[in-house]
Amino acid sequence: MKYAVAFRTIVTKEVRRFMRIWPQTLLPPAVTTSLYFLIFGTLIGKRVGEVNGASYMDYIVPGVILMSVISHSYANVVSSFYSTKFQRHIEELLVAPIPNWVILGGYVCGGIIRGVLVGCVVLLISSFFTDLTVHNVWLSAAVFVLTATLFALAGFINAVFADSFDDISIIPNFILTPLSYLGGVFYSVSMLPEIWQKISLGNPILYMINAFRYGMIGVSDVDVRMALVITGGFIVFFTLFSLFLLHKGVGIKT
């Protein structure tokens, strides 16, 4: 492949960047999710009982895993690409004879790898709290990777528009985190009043979490096919928008 070396170089740089500081990138989610499983799954779960035919611990595990994938795939790309802009390394990429899709693909793949690694760490930790039998391995893997791809792209777009380090924390703190918690990680949408059920259906993260939950334990509040269509549609849109931003040099060229 003509641009294989350039693509591999960007991906390798991204992986080495977060693996070099693994106590800050891979260890914290392990500790945080252990607390989620201990407090929500073990202590509170005994009082809740079953949700849609599954034990409460089994029910929350897919959501907690995907929530970690979302936050870390996003965080990796937004922090890395903005740092490239801030430190003026972006100029080296712009003058290099490589197309925009290679630049975008390299950064997104780095985010996917970190998201998948963190998700696997959380999955491993969950095995100490419950004994899950995966309902559909291929669906679970597909949603796993598609979700990481989507939020890696979203992180790239945030980094393009960011003008300061404060700007790269606004979206995760005020949009991603609330949408994740309100996406049915710790509860079933059917538990909500009817009006809130309808409002929740406007949350795209709800569909991803439920699609992954269906793949893991065979339980979902939404149509899984619709969830895949929505996720795929966002990926296509974000990819085209990111390439457009790179082509125009928005937030990059001065």
Image (tube, helix red, strand yellow):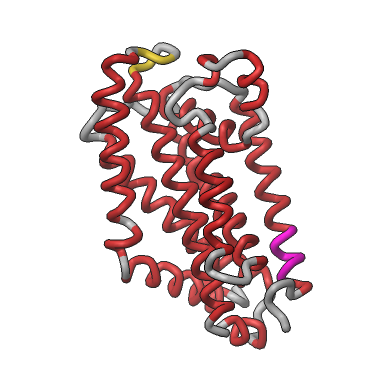
Q: Is residue 242 magenta?
A: yes
Would you identify the image quadrant in which residue 47 lies?
top left
Q: Quadrant of the N terminus?
A: bottom right
Answer with left or right where residue 179 lies relative to residue 132.
right
Q: Main secondary structure of the magenta part?
A: helix
Q: Residue at x 50, y 47 (%)?
A: 145
> Would residue 202 be found to the left or right of residue 53 on screen?
right
Q: How many marks?
A: 0
Residue 236 located left or right of residue 193: right
Q: Answer with the quarter of the image where residue 86 lies.
A: bottom right
Q: Above or below — where is 131 with respect to 35? A: above
Q: Nearer the viewer, residue 64 or 198?
A: 198
Name the image quarter holding residue 40: top left
The range drawn in magenta is 241-246
In the displayed structure, does residue 194 sit left or right of residue 182?
A: right
Asked whether 62 falls inside the magenta stretch, the response is no
Position in image of residue 32 (x %, y %): 31, 45
- Residues 236 and 56: in front is 56
User: Please, is residue 14 above or below residue 44 in the view?
Assistant: below
The answer to whether residue 142 is seen in the rendering is: no
Residue at horizontal 51 percent and vertical 38 percent from the top: 180
